[in-house]
Image: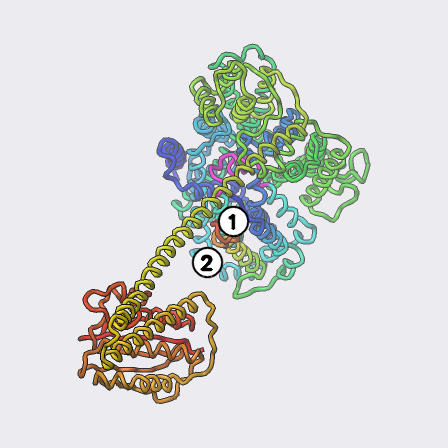
Amino acid sequence: MNISSKKRSAFLLLAALMLLLFNAPLLSICNKIAFCYGIPSLYIYLFTTWFCCILLLIVNATFRNYDNNKKP
Amino acid sequence: MSLFFIVSCSIFYLSLLFLIAYWVEKRNKKTTNKSWIYALSLAVYCTGWTYYGSVGRATTNGPEFLSIYLGPSIMCALFVPLLRKLLRICKTQRLNSIADLISTRYGKNYTLGVIVTLCCVIGIIPYIALQLKAISASFHIISNHHSAIPAVNWNNDTFIIAAILSLFIIIFGTRSVDASERHEGLVAAIAFESIIKLIAFLAVGIFATYYLFDGFSSVFNAAKEAGFDQFFTLNKGLGNNDWLAMILVSMLSIIFLPRQFQVSVVENTNEKNIYRAMWLFPLYLFLINLFVLPIAMSGKLLLSQSVIADTYVLSLPLNFNQPLLGMLVYIGGLSAASGMIIVETIALSTMLSNHLFLPFVFSLQKAKLNDEKSTVRKIIYSRRTSIILILLMACCYNKWIASSTSLVNIGLISMAAVAQFAPATIGGLYSKLITRQGAITGIVAGFLIWFYTIIIPNVVDAGYLSTDIMQYGPFNIFWLKPQSLFGMSTQGLLAHSFFWSIFFNLGLMILVSMCTSATRQEEYQAELFVNIYKYEGITGGPGMWKASAYLSDVSSLLTNFIGKTRADNLLSSYAQRHKIPLTNKEADPRIIDFSEKILTGVIGSASARFLISNIAKEEEISIDKVLSIVKESQQVLELNKELKKKSGELTKAKGELTEVNEQLMRLDVLKDEFLYTVTHELRTPLTSIRAMSEILCDNPEMEEEQRQYYLEGIVKEIERLTYLITQVLNLERYESGRQKLHYAAVDVSLLIKDVIGSLEPLIKGKAITVAFSQPSSMILIQCDEDMIRQVIYNLISNAIKFVPENTGTINIICRTDIDEMQVWVSDNGKGVPEELHELIFDKFFQAKNQTIQKPSGSGLGLAICKRIVEMHQGSIYVEQVLPQGAKFVFTLPNS
């Protein structure tokens, strides 16, 4: 099972993106007592972003095919 | 709830785990979809600390607890670059613990194995103790609630729980002497536990959010009105970097915690399983954390202040009279804690016995190693002793230390401890620069700093040390204060400790590595680790040692550790696979290498190395030589691949050649046939001419009238001959491609009318009707006018030839659409049988098939038509017309 370097770097970039999304400068935008439909903004931000990242992981790990002829 | 009910439920649940483990080990292994089990078993990460502690942490620190689960989710994205490589290495070298991995990377070094093992034991025992405490505390709460029965002694039930769990671990964890062998039953039980704890936690979450309140916004509103602002934001975490530190620490812990290493690397059955795990595991973490904040808020809002926040999960259902839900929650907590204890203990016991006990035993009794049964027994006993010892240590920790130490952060502290292995491991995976001394210095320094900056403050908190050390530093050296080392005081406890420990760990590791050089064994391992993918497919791997040993010694050594039948089976199948003769007295180096790997799986790489070196006379060869051997086998492999590719190409080329050859032969036959037919066709008029000329020659006194008749005949035959030769020459010109097309815009209907006009004598002669339905508009087509005229001429004259006299009718239709222009020439002649629809366009078709009466014509007309139409990128075909007749259609493209 060989994995194309494209796929490897896609995962590396995804990890870097997640580190950015879940840390200080971005996170501090939502880190205040504000509510959206009665739910705190930080809570909404963390969980929706988290869920989107999981979707990206699913797409990358299961469906996305960088090798053209090989299934991952 | 009655004590009896709770105890029987607990025992029933644990027996269920036994049953699952037993059932999975017994049945056919192929039927399970292991990637799901693998992904779920990773959720052993969620311990009792997650289960009860997250809510407690959320009560004081708000959403901060999420960082411990976001970190692993980020790490999952790095599974492909990192975990895959680890898996590959551990599988090829049969490594079975993190200590084994690090010691093997740095030249199968004993010291490193021991250091890593000790760090793990010191770092993890409190964590196991915490789990035992979680079980006993939850038992305490559920049994004491609304019940008069006095609780069992707090410390005694930890011992009972530990005893039951150790029984389970001994039965399922030490079955085989080979530690690198997978415990499939056990992993299935762990996966099952993961499902149970998720269901239980979601159940209590839904209960708190939708039963006690009206959904998320209602809980959040209530908390907002009560002024619990701490739930909504990260108070300090972002500012003092604790949040970032927690993310990083938990990222590393998902690989380096012994239990995580055990489930994700040692128990992995297939590399591809990580593709499911890398999204299913974060999804699991997502789900289990969804309700933590609502539960914490409900607890804080609805329960009395005396209830500890860590127990909200259990207290909520019990306080609101939901004993069954309470029971489910208790079982879920039991799952979370017992799963962690089981896997962690197995991982730690393997390390402890392979890196501490067994080397000690072997060096003491070097001579007595030749008794098969006693050696195997020794290993198993050493592992079982380790298991009991670990659980005993955890119990003692609970009894004497934990009661006075704050336990809130134990999980994080353990994770920070194992994070110290990250620089040496990750550095060792990707760089050959790091040496053994560097790794040792780094790990020891990092671990000491960890101890100093995070354990000492806890010890001081517990009152074992004076608080002076926190305020003024040891011996009044202010820059050595444990919580603000070198004056760094703005960071959180964890961020501070993590930064300094990793800083010194990494810094010293690199510094020392640059000042020392690696041994040959280390260089060899570094090459194998860093370039693991390069050596894919090289069977057995090249031996580092050119060892010479007696085969009998090797096989008896293996027999001692894995039993005679298994040793014989393994050796003979390996020899067969690699075509190594087993009849020689001396063992092949590959056999020695293979045996070392088998032993590594049983007792760890350092011990295996030691034992092999006892029986084998070794000649250390230089790393260059090893590498050149590796390179050679690699080249052979590549050459093989290339040869295979070349041979494939050759076969393909040969196939193509054969095909071309066959085509040529077919063409040759066609050409012969053509020549034969042409000469035959030419001979017919020639024969007539000769006959008539002879008649003329022999009868000089022939009457003028008769002479004229013969002369006319001769002229006619010569005309026919000329026509035939012209046709053949034309066809040849079209086929060879020498004929150039002179394109011009041609009005096709005009052309058709023209042709009909030129054929008028023939039409009149046969008294037939020719109808041409003209299109409403002019049809202009880009084509060679002369050639298309010939096509139309040939088709109409053919039709005239075949229609009956007097009653014959010929219909010509010309029509056009977007793509092409079509001309239909249909008649009511005898038609063309279906099977001849293709053949009719062949050269000399009618000549070849003349049966009764030879129709006039050369037999080349339709072949020429086909050729001309094809030169114009059009097509020509014939259709049957009902009730009688044929319809010839040719098309020309419009553009």
Q: Identify the chain of the residue marked 2, using the numbered disc in the image.
A: B
In the rendering, at what x and y percent does residue B683 appear? 30, 65
Q: Which residues are magenta?
A: B253-272
Can the viewer see residue B837?
no
Between discs 1 and 2, the one toward the N terminus: 2
Can the viewer see residue B413?
yes
Closest to the camera, between mark 1 and mark 2, is: 1
Q: Quadrant of residue B675?
A: bottom left
B233 left or right, relative to B732:
right
Q: Identify the chain of the residue marked 1, using the numbered disc in the image.
A: B
In the rendering, at what x and y percent does residue B267 appear? 49, 35
Q: Which residue is mark 2?
A: B213
Of residues B748 and B488, which is closer to you in this image? B748
- Which amino acid type is marked by label 2? Phe
Residue B6 covered by magenta stretch: no
Of residues B326 and B758, which is closer to you in this image? B758
- Seen at 31% across and 85% down, the residue is B756
| Location of the C terminus of chain B (image quadrant) | bottom left
Residue farthest along the bottom direction in this orientation:
B776
B18 left or right, relative to B635:
left
Q: For the residues marked 1 and 2, what is the alpha-carbon distance in whole angstroms?
A: 28 Å
- Seen at 54% across and 27% down, the residue is B350
Q: Which residue is mark 1?
A: B282
In the rendering, at what x and y percent does residue A30 appear? 62, 61
- Which amino acid type is marked by label 1? Pro
